[in-house]
Image (cartoon, grey):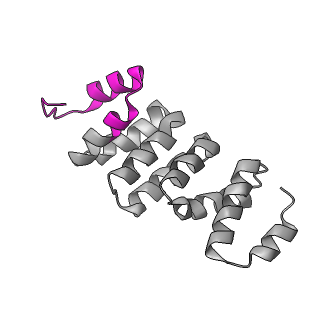
């Protein structure tokens, strides 16, 4: 990381292999190499997307980039760890669009519906209706 590599792929491969996902995310973000983060999440290891999102939130990355990153991986993204990472940082509302999209696609995943429930209750957007009509 100290070498200021022009190409972050070797660093990303090493960090991915040994589980240093926060470093793998922080370095490209702070060096304005967002395309490497996108490629990592989309092609290399979508299962680590929740950790990437958590680090991006810690680095105060713009929400638009995080939302587009999440939407670009959609069905490959493990929902439960993503919700946990966002919930730890009190940023669960960031996932509203993604979760609503999954529900509209017919998702029956309990974690999707529970996270959406939390968002609806926190934002007070007709929670009674959601709680009485949602079978999950």
> In this rendering, would 38 be left or right of 9?
right
Please tell me which residue is depicted at 70% across the width and 53% down the height of the picture: 112
Locate residue 21, reporting x and y percent: 39, 33
Locate residue 38, reporting x and y percent: 39, 44
Q: In the rendered view, tell whether residue 79 sits above or below residue 124.
A: above
Q: In the rendered view, tell whether residue 76 sits above or below residue 86.
A: above
Locate residue 64, reporting x and y percent: 41, 63
In reply to whether residue 22 is colored magenta, the answer given is yes
> In this rendering, would 17 be left or right of 129?
left
Please tell me which residue is depicted at 46% across the width and 40% down the height of the picture: 51
User: Going by the picture, which residue comes out furthest to the left?
Assistant: 3
Please tell me which residue is depicted at 59% across the width and 50% down the height of the picture: 83
Please tell me which residue is depicted at 76% across the width and 49% down the height of the picture: 110
In reply to whether residue 103 is colored magenta, the answer given is no
> In this rendering, would 49 be left or right of 65?
right
Nearest the eye: 69 or 82: 82
Image quadrant where residue 47 sits: top right
Q: In the rendered view, tell whether residue 111 sits above or below residue 48.
A: below
Q: Quadrant of the N terminus?
A: top left
What secondary structure is the stretch in magenta mostly built from? helix
Q: Quadrant of the C terminus?
A: bottom right
Q: Which residues are magenta?
A: 1-25
Locate residue 102, reporting x and y percent: 68, 55
Image quadrant where residue 80 sits: top right
Nearest the eye: 89 or 39: 89
Disc tally is 0
């Amino acid at each position: 990381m100290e070498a200021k590599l022009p190409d972050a792929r070797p660093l990303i491969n090493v960090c991915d292999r040994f589980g240093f996902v926060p470093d793998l995310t922080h370095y490209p973000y702070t060096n304005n190499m967002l395309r490497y983060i996108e490629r990592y999440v989309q092609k290399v290891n979508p299962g680590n997307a929740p950790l990437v999102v958590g680090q991006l939130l810690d680095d105060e990355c713009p929400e638009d980039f995080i939302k587009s990153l999440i939407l670009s991986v959609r069905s490959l993204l493990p929902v439960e760890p993503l919700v946990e990472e966002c919930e730890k940082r009190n940023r669960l509302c960031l996932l509203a669009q993604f979760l609503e999209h999954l529900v509209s696609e017919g998702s029956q995943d309990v974690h999707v519906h529970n996270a959406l429930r939390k968002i609806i209750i926190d934002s007070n957007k007709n929670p009674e209706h959601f709680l009485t009509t949602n079978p999950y």
